Image: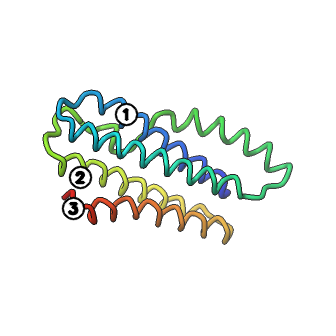
Amino acid sequence: MFKTYEILDIAIQLENNAETLYRSKAREFDRSDLRELMIWMADEEKNHAQWFASLKNRVKISDEEALMREMSEDLLTDFMGKACFSLDDAVFQEIRTKSELVETFIEFEEDTILFYELLQSFITDDDTAKNLKNIIEEEKKHINTFKQKGFL
């Protein structure tokens, strides 16, 4: 049902939405360490979006699929808008510590993984399933990065 390029479009949109939100919310923090952590995370999301875009550029599609791809990108933008899952409900001005901020980041990453796992049930071809698995693994790396850096 879903093609790799559609899933990558979703991934790119989610990363871009999170990056935009992190950058805008970073300005609201009085503490420089929290502001810097927000900017670091925004940069991570930007890098993720670029990584997904590079994957998307390697996906081979037919001429017929190219037209569908263009249409699906427009629909996706309309559908996803600025959605950021749990980040939409986060109250950043109430965050006082790095660990609280990192917990918010992890919650978003976990929500994103759950979303992709839900998409797995709509995947009908092996290549797309493999690419989605790679996307999920990449999202899990973000969570592991937080744990390894000792933010919690």
State left or right for residue 47 relative to residue 148.
Answer: right
Q: Quadrant of residue 77?
A: top right
Find numbered disc 2 in the image and state the secondary structure of the residue it sits on.
Answer: helix
Find numbered disc 3 in the image and state the secondary structure of the residue it sits on.
Answer: loop
Q: Nearer the viewer, mark 1 or mark 2?
A: 1
Q: In the image shown, does 105 or 151 lie closer to the viewer? A: 151
State left or right for residue 72 relative to residue 121.
Answer: right
Q: Quarter of the image containing the N terminus? A: bottom right
Q: Is residue 147 above or below residue 98?
A: below
- Give the total of numbered labels: 3
**Residue 3 location in percent, x, y?**
67, 57
Q: In the image shown, does 53 or 150 lie closer to the viewer? A: 150
Identify residue for label 2.
103
Q: Quarter of the image containing the C terminus? A: bottom left
Dot label at residue 23 = 1
Dot label at residue 150 = 3
Residue for point 83% across, 54% down: 62
Question: How many C-alpha atoms fall within 10 Å of the one at disc 1: few (<14), some, or many (≥20)?
Answer: some
C-alpha span from label 3 to label 2: 12 Å
Looking at the image, tell me whether mark 1 or mark 3 is earlier in sequence order.
1
Query: The residue under label 1 is which amino acid type?
Result: Arg
Residue for point 42% across, 44% down: 43
Q: In the image shown, does 136 or 147 lie closer to the viewer? A: 147
Q: In the image shown, does 7 or 31 lie closer to the viewer? A: 31
C-alpha span from label 1 to label 3: 23 Å
